Amino acid sequence: MSENESFIDEVTEEVRRDKLYLLLKKYGWIGVVAIVLVILISIFFELRSNARIAASEERGDFLAEALSDTKENRNELNKEILDFFQADSFITLMFNSRLYEQNSEFDNMKRTFETIANSKGFSSSFKSFAKLKWILLENDDLNMAEETINQLITPDNPFRLLALEQKVLIKIKQQNWKDAQENLDLIIGDPNISQGLRSRTRYLQNAITFGSS
C-alpha cells in the first residue's frame, strides 16, 4: 500500500512538473519580455538623468563664466546667453538686468524686473524677488512702491523682512515716524531676522529717534 502511494505521489509530481513546463513554454515569453522592458526602461531613465545632469553642468559652467566675465561686448554676451536660454527666461532677464546695472540703465532694469514680476511663467519666489528689486529702484512713486511692499510682507513670503525694511525707509522719507517705528518693531521682533539686517536696524532706529525728536 505504501509502494502504491509512493508511486502515485511520483506520478502526481511528474504531472505537476509537466504542467509547469507547459505553462512556462506557453507563457514564459511574457516574463522575459517584462524583464527586458524593465531593463530598457531603467536604461532610458538613467540616460535621461545623465543627459539632464550633463546639461545642468554645462549651464552651470556657462553661468559661472558669464558671471565672472568682464568683457564689454554686450551683444556678444547676449548672443551667448540666448544660445543656452530662451529670450524670456528668468536667467536671460536677470543677465540683462545685470548688464543694465553695469551701464547705469536703471529704467531698463526696472522694466526688466516688472516683466519678471508680471509674468505668469515664473514661480512666486522669482516674482517676489523681482518686486523687491523693483522697489529698490523706485524713487519717484513711493505710493506704488509701498503698495508693492504690502504684497511682499505676508508671513509666508521669503522676502518679508527685507520688504519691511524698505517700508521703514519709505516711512522715514515721508517723516511718518510712528509707522516707521511700528514696522521697525516688527522686524526686530521677528525670530528669523538675519545678523546683517539686525545690524541695519540700529541705523534705522537712530534715524527714527533723531527725526522724531
Image (tube, rainbow, N blue to C red):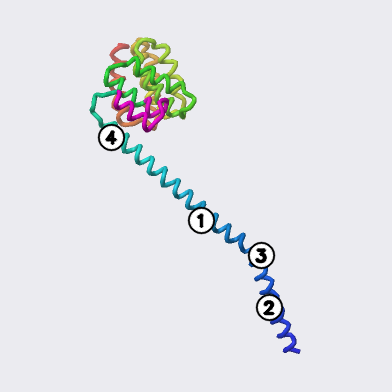
Residues in magenta, as a range:
75-93
Q: Badge 4 local density, few (<14 within 10 Å), some, or many (20+)?
A: few
Image point (67%, 67%), residue name: 23
Mark sitting earlier along the chain (4/1): 1
- Magenta segment: does it hold 179? no
Between marks 4 and 1, how big is the CA–CA gap? 39 Å
Between marks 2 and 1, how big is the CA–CA gap? 34 Å
Mark sitting earlier along the chain (4/3): 3
Image point (46%, 29%), residue name: 123
Give amino acid for label 2: Glu
Identify whether 192 is placed above or below 134. below
| Residue identified by numbered label 3 | 26
| Residue identified by numbered label 1 | 39
Q: Badge 1 local density, few (<14 within 10 Å), some, or many (20+)?
A: few
Is residue 32 visible in the rendered image? The answer is yes
Mark sitting earlier along the chain (1/3): 3
Give amino acid for label 4: Glu
Mark sitting earlier along the chain (2/3): 2
Which label lies toward us, 4 or 1? 1
Mark sitting earlier along the chain (2/4): 2
Question: At which x and y percent is residue 204?
Answer: 31, 19
Q: Which mark is residue 65?
A: 4
